[in-house]
Amino acid sequence: MRICLIASSAYPVAEPFAGGLEALVHQLARGLVARGHEVSLFAAAGSDPALRVTSLEAVEFRSSRVAGRDVNAPPERWMAEHHAYLSLMLGLADGGASRYDVVHNHSLHHLPVAMAPMLDVPMLTTLHTPPLPWLESAILAAPGATAFTAVSRWTAQAWAHVVTSAPVLNGVDTDAWPWGPGGGPVVWTGRLVREKAPHDAMDAARVAGLPLVLAGPVTDDAYFEEAIAPRLGPHAVHVGHLDHRALARLLGRAAVAVVTPEWDEPYGLVAAEAMSCGTPVAAYARGALPELVNDEVGALAMPGDVDGLAVALDRARRRDRRTVRAHAVERLSAARMIEEYEARYLALAGGEVAA
């Protein structure tokens, strides 16, 4: 099939990934090409050159001095992104059906959904986040113009008041995240920001008497200095933002991975990556994490309960790593995800939505 993938104009689809959306699109594009499909990816500049990428150029815009005095003027970055998606959708409306069999929209921008009625090619939109006001308004403005999936049952339910979406769990490349022997420290991975609460992971590991390694970029300097730096020491270290291979090695050696969101995670990619390495997961039972983690492959704690998380760490590290790996291969793999999306593409190209 000829497949058009739309990603974000804000972050490139390249390692190290800015988030789960970029990682998913990268996996999907590579996997579809490997299965013989022709894939065109529209994404931010700097995306992986190994993919067939057209840059969603958010051209820098400077309004005139007169226009800048408008008290209702939106930010110039917002206008630049608006025009990037507008140009893309106008291009797809002009003969898109001659170039593509299906359009798969992963952006969080409203225009691909709002302008979907203009296209002669079917569109599938994947919901990656809890509801966003602009995207809600676009769905209501263009009912039925695109089919929807969601990255988890939790995310589908969060959008249920606006639209029906079929859950297709994200997947990870289980070959790229190989089984490891474990036996090492507790590992926390992700952006070091307050809503992901790595400070809770540090406190729980200390209560459990287990060493901890944090891996990820510092994107909030004030939070890091306030909540992370004072907790660092011999039993809690930060190793920075690792590339994929280094992170896979770290997770493969970890005794347990810990996931501590202060918000409802739409999926929980870091948990899937850890389990692909055979590493059990201790996590707060928030968002979609209970869909990924059960008592055979990890342990859950009540959100915000550091002492309960310490108990979960001790329980999780006793799980059988082969069982954890098998769970990831069967339920959380990119191969399974790509097959599910392929079925939906074929159904849409044939004029109906897959059940």
Image: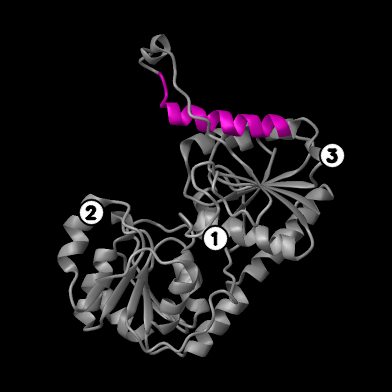
Report the residue marked by disc 3. 98
Q: Amino acid at mark 1?
A: Ser
Q: Residue at x 78, y 37 (%)?
A: 96
Q: Is residue 279 left or right of residue 165?
A: left
Whether residue 210 can be seen here: yes
Dot 2 or dot 1: first in sequence order is 1
Report the residue marked by disc 2. 223
Report the residue marked by disc 1. 152
Instruction: Tell me the CA gap for discs 2 and 3.
Output: 50 Å
Q: Residue at x 44, y 72 (%)?
A: 247
Q: Nearer the viewer, residue 352 or 240?
A: 240
Q: Does the magenta portion include 88?
A: yes
Q: Residue at x 44, y 31 (%)?
A: 77
Q: Amino acid at mark 3?
A: Ser
Q: Nearer the viewer, mark 3 or mark 1?
A: 3
Q: Quadrant of residue 263?
A: bottom left
Magenta span covers which residues? Answer: 73-91
Circle 1 SS class: loop
Place of residue 147 in the rendered image (x, y in percent of width and height, measured from the top left): 68, 46
